[in-house]
Image (tube, grey):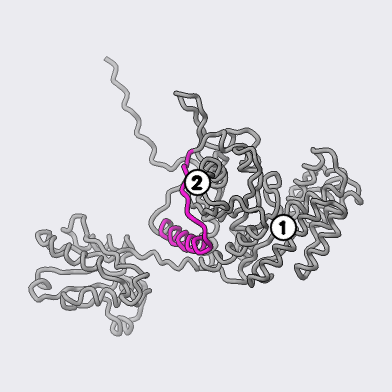
């Protein structure tokens, strides 16, 4: 009789393109999102949690660089009715569906913010995952560019609240209508040629003015030595594009003047320039100067998606890449006006504008600058010297958990604490556990301490520093273990924690 084959054990590995987040990562993200939510809430935006699953029909074809509905998303077909469903690829497409579905019950304009994971079925790569967090704020139903200016101001405030000071970021603003005006003034009637020009404009930040000139003309050699065919425009035809991309002046007024010249007689272009001028005036009135927000025609985002103002938040400080080269950190947020998205459901144009923050990129920037404001501090560990006295240890941990780290500032929260729940036989293993948990303090109460009404409190942070090579004098000046009366347990633990706050 043949032996039955054993079912192979599953591989314990994360699926390709996904990752696991552990304690410090989750805590840092939660803390940052809470700060962002406070700003959004202060601006009058309400929270929305929409479904993580949408119909493919509702999601539409707005995923960047994807033409087919099911490409780029995780989709499946329902067996009962044949409907195609998919995990959301962003937070904006679900908003359009939510607004269209509930518009009779929602205020107009509707201001909402949303935070959560999104999924994209794309080829993963370094720093490119198939699941990641987004943090959005949008205003639906407001045609005035005052809504766009408000989003830009809120974005600047948000960056500063989470720990990016002025001078380390800039919010750049442009308008798709201005670009449309430039294309109109060029007299391009062939759609494929217009699309080629748009793709070339999108490369301005990589190849610069000279590179764009070449790509609009006959073509150019790229960094690898390969020849890239150009659009085939004459120098005269290409000039409006160059004038548009290089129109940023020393002041907003100069930039606006240059853009007026770039769009020529185009009405839509003139409308776009007027909107930018209004946004600049509104921001100036609110105290948002060019050190925080600037009009910058080089910003080109989602050319087939946005219908008016577009904006991008860029971090301007230098980092060192994996090859040791200095470079700027780059963009962490972007958005703009998308007046056609809700129309897919309602048949009527509904103005909308919003911004999306790349949560993981912003967290990476804060870590790069040491500005997360969080140390990976574990809980106080109450060790177990006598398993028959577990009630005593539970009483200690309850006292600690109910005590504020700083009674004068409850916002700092209460003390994290836990009882060691492993095998207490080997005390050394308990301290190893505390070290692995990155615990700042261990509490010890054996039979002798219990009889004398005392507890031992071990400062594990100082102990680790001493073990790493602190001098004998420092050991003598700052002992890392204390014996205190049992009723002073909380006070002494609080003292140690405040010393490392």
* Crowd class of label 2 (few under 14; some 14 to 19; many from 20; radius 10 Å): few
The residue to which callout 2 is attached is: 105
Q: Is residue 144 above or below residue 252?
A: above
Q: Is residue 34 magenta?
A: yes
Looking at the rendering, the stretch of residues picked out in magenta corresponds to 26-53
Q: Residue furthest top?
A: 1
Q: Secondary structure at mark 1?
A: strand
If the image is split into quadrants, where does the N terminus sit?
A: top left
Please indicate, yes or no, whether residue 131 appears anywhere in the rendered image.
yes
Where residue 489 appears, as percent x and y from the top left, is 21, 74
Q: Is residue 290 above or below residue 4?
A: below
Q: Check if mark 1's residue and mark 2's residue have beta carbons within 8 Å.
A: no
| Residue 174 badge | 1
Please state which of residues 37 and 193 is positioned toward the viewer in this rendering: 37
Where residue 130 appears, as percent x and y from the top left, is 52, 43
Where residue 223 appears, as percent x and y from the top left, is 75, 50
* Crowd class of label 1 (few under 14; some 14 to 19; many from 20; radius 10 Å): many
Residue 348 occupies which quadrant of the picture? top right
- Which residue is pictured at 76% across the width and 46% down the height? 198
Q: Residue furthest left?
A: 451
């Amino acid at each position: 009789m043949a032996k039955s084959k054993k079912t192979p054990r599953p591989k314990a590995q994360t699926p390709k393109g996904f990752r696991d987040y552990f304690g410090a990562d989750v805590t840092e993200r939660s803390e940052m999102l809470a700060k962002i939510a406070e700003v959004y809430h202060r601006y009058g935006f309400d929270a929305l949690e929409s479904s993580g699953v949408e119909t493919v029909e509702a999601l539409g074809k707005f995923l960047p660089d994807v033409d087919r509905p099911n490409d780029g998303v995780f989709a499946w077909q329902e067996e009962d009715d044949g409907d195609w469903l998919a995990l959301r690829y962003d937070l904006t497409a679900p908003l359009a569906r939510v607004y269209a579905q509930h518009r009779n019950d929602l205020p107009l304009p509707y201001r909402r913010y949303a935070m959560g994971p999104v999924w994209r079925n794309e080829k993963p790569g370094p720093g490119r995952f198939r699941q990641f967090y987004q943090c959005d704020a949008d205003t639906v139903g407001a045609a005035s560019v005052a809504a766009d200016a408000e989003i830009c101001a809120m974005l600047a405030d948000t960056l500063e609240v989470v720990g990016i000071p002025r001078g380390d970021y800039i919010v750049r603003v442009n308008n798709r209508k201005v670009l449309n005006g430039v294309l109109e003034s060029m007299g391009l009637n062939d759609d494929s040629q217009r699309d080629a020009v748009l793709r070339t404009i999108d490369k301005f930040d990589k190849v610069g003015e000279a590179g764009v000139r070449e790509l609009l003309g006959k073509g150019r050699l790229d960094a690898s030595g390969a020849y890239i065919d150009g659009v085939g425009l004459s120098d005269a035809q290409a000039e409006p594009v160059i004038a548009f991309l290089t129109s940023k002046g020393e002041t907003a007024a100069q930039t606006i003047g240059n853009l007026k010249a770039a769009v020529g007689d185009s009405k839509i272009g003139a409308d776009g320039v007027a909107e930018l001028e209004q946004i600049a005036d509104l921001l100036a009135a609110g105290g948002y100067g060019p050190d925080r927000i600037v009009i910058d025609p080089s910003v080109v985002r989602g050319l087939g998606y946005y219908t008016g103002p577009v904006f991008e938040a860029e971090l301007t400080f230098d980092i060192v890449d994996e090859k040791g080269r200095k470079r700027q950190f780059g963009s962490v947020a972007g958005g703009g006006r998308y007046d056609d998205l809700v129309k897919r459901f309602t048949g009527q144009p509904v103005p909308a504008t919003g911004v999306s923050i790349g949560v993981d990129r912003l967290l990476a920037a804060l870590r790069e600058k040491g500005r997360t404001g969080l140390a990976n501090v574990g809980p106080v560990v109450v060790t177990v010297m006598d398993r028959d006295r577990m009630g005593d240890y539970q009483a200690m941990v309850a006292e600690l958990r109910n005590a504020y780290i700083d009674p004068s500032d409850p916002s700092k929260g209460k003390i994290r604490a836990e009882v060691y729940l492993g095998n207490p036989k080997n005390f050394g293993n308990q301290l190893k556990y505390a070290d692995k948990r990155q615990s700042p303090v261990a509490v010890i109460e054996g039979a002798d301490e219990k009889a004398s009404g005392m507890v031992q409190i071990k400062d594990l942070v100082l102990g680790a520093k001493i073990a790493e090579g602190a001098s004998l004098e420092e050991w003598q000046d700052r002992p890392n273990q204390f014996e205190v009366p049992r009723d002073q347990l909380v006070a002494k633990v609080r003292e140690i924690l405040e010393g490392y706050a």
